[in-house]
Amino acid sequence: DLRGGVAQTGARPVSACGQGEPVTVTGRLRSVVYTPRETVPTVDAELYDGSGSVHLVWLGRRKIAGIEPGRVLVASGRLAERDGVKVIFNPWYELKPVGA
């Protein structure tokens, strides 16, 4: 189901994305963690597309409307790796309609 969405949006499967590449990915948010820190608060959302996961991390944000588990979205940015985990910091994103 999720892999079909990858082809429809022109995104790449997470499993085919390499470190340092500008990428566009799409999938469903599995989890969202808000980390209120004294210095830099963060929102960390795990996006799963059926082939793998990437963490979308927004720095300096305490909460983002619409970023919640189960929501489908398209995200773009430069892929990095942190402790062996794929990450896109401060990605551009487009929320898909609920139920899409």
Image (spheres, rainbow, N blue to C red):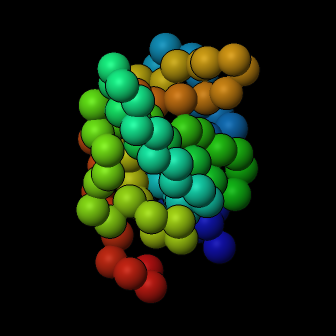
- x then y, percent, for residue 24: 41, 41
Residue 24 in sight in this render: no
Question: Residue at point 44% right, 85% down?
Answer: 99
Q: Residue at x 65, y 44 (%)?
A: 53
Left or right, 19 with reference to 57: right
Q: Residue furthest bottom?
A: 99
- The C terminus - image quarter: bottom left
Quarter occupied by residue 31: bottom right
| One can see residue 75 in this view | yes
Judge whether 97 appears above or below 57 on screen: below
Seen in the picture, residue 82 relative to 11 is either above or below; the reply is above
The residue most toward the front is 38
* Residue 35: image location, x then y, percent: 46, 39
* Image vertical order of residue 72 relative to residue 35, above or below: below
Residue drawn at (49%, 24%) of the image: 79
- Residue drawn at the location 32% of the way across and 44% of the way down: 62
Look at the image and tell me in which quarter the N terminus lies.
bottom right
Residue 49 drawn at (x, y percent): 62, 55
Where residue 30 appears, as percent x and y from the top left, is: 61, 59
